[in-house]
Amino acid sequence: MTERKVRVRFAPSPTGALHIGGVRTALYNYLFARQHGGELIFRIEDTDSHRFVPGAEEYIIESFRWLGIKFDEGVGFGGSHGPYRQSERRDIYKEYVTRLLDAGKAYIAFDTPEELEAKRNEIQNFQYDSHTRLQMRNSLTLSKEDVDRLIADGAQYTVRFKIEPGMEVRVDDMIRGEVVVKSDILDDKVLYKSADELPTYHLANIVDDHLMEITHVIRGEEWLPSAPLHVLLYQAFGWTDTMPKFAHLPLLLKPEGKGKLSKRDGDRLGFPVFPLEWHDPKTGEVSSGYRESGYFPEAVVNFLALLGWNPGTDQELFTLDQLVEAFDITKCSLHGAKFDYQKGIWFNHEYILQKSDDEIAGLFAPIVANNGIDESMERVTQVVHMMKDRVSFVKELWPLCSFFFVAPTEYDEKTVKKRWKEYSARQMTELAEVLEGIEDFSIEGQETVVMKWVEDKGYKLGDVMNAFRLALVGIGKGPGMFDITAFLGKEETLRRLHAAIDLLK
Ligand code: GLU
């Protein structure tokens, strides 16, 4: 067998917002494609028209654009293996269904839903398979004439895959190794429904993977039970030479570790499970997204990459290119990965630290302006420089930093009680005089003079600084006092000091 160019695909069904687990699946496909010099295809699996949700496809494309995950081919990207939307490939699937029927590898079944229900009630754990198919109404039990007449009369039917019993089906999984399943446990899956003239997921999926020359199928663990059927379909078509290798990724679990991560967990604990905010067109419900919550796309990618895979070292921070370099699909874990959303917040904090002050200031400046403050970019950047190590999101900066731009109009009651002593007004008045006389109002310039004054007077440094902070900031926390005063400048510092003395007596 000649080496084929690596081609992988991400094949979502447009049934709503893309779940964060789907994002991870796409990311792993992307990393695998890039590291093998291969191609990533974006296919839309929309054969189930009942579950189609308008806007979902656009949402998915926009999500990956935001995350920086680029596709080489597919819906919205073009390519030579199209169309990439399954609803536009009906004729192709029909041809392949006919092929299986002609080869005797599939058969036509006329059983109505009621008949199937009756069978299920009659036989415990009923399964449509080699043991039961001869008791049913299908082209194996009816004469050719009857079958033709039923179809001519417009009877609805399905096409079922005829699975031979007594075989061992081998799934070559890059994470799990060889998974062997006995064909007897599989049922004769429906491949096609005459009612909507559409194939089911299984047939469309296999035919497309074959025609699109997919070499590796990387998808969520929930598809593992379908894999033996997919292998058998490849064999039935005679495509074993080009059968893709599989990788079924570990589940994303609830933060507590038990059970599959759901949207409800996000609602309950307050974190998004979707990349972008999603407006459900049917219910009108709005679900939060990572983008709108203030996460950086790089942080989300980094966080997701490490849910189910780790590099085997202590390194946690990876750019997308570094991930391409380090990622190894065979080292994915077999067990589900706990969705530790706090870790996601940590990643965002790390990316704030990594990014330049200028970049963060560019994001913070509009927030400052929205609060009615007219400040130069240079001054906004100075504040970012002092404060960014204290936040995980840019939006957390304003509540923490507003005092740099707006003088306090009130003083935190508890802090006043604790920090404003009966002698504080007197000390602060003296301090104002000391500051007044300082020529060099830089951090160092003030520090030397103020420290000497405190020492000469025999004051307690803590007392002085706590009252000073309260006067300038309004609360008991913040960066170094002289960082603040150097930023505010002499005039504003004295103004705030006097205002506090007046108000607090
Ligand atoms: N359409 C399936 C999904 O929504 C694709 C599964 C697969 O990758 O084979 O996840």
Image (tube, rainbow, N blue to C red):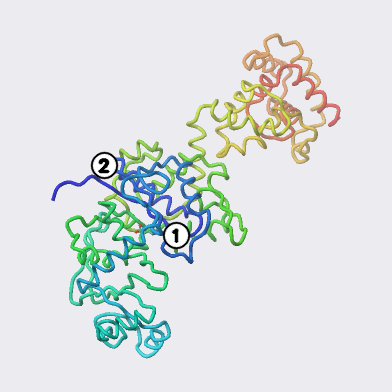
Q: Relative to the observer, which residue lies in front, 291 or 501? A: 291
Ligand 1's quadrant is bottom left
Asked whether the viewer can see residue 312, the reply is no
- Between residue 495 and residue 406, name the one nearer to us: 406
Name the one closer to the observer, 504 or 73: 73
Q: Is residue 19 above or below residue 199?
A: above
Q: Residue at x 20, y 55 (%)?
A: 242
Regarding residue 280, the answer to whether it shows in the image is yes
Image-quadrant location for residue 89: bottom left
Position of the C terminus, as image quadrant, is top right
**Mark 2–mark 1 CB contact (< 8 Å):** no
Query: In this rendering, would 381 be left or right of 221?
Result: right
Residue, disc 2: 36
Closer mark to the observer between disc 2 and disc 1 = 2
User: Which residue does the numbered mark 1 point to in the structure image?
Assistant: 257
Residue 191 point in image, percent of width and height: 32, 70
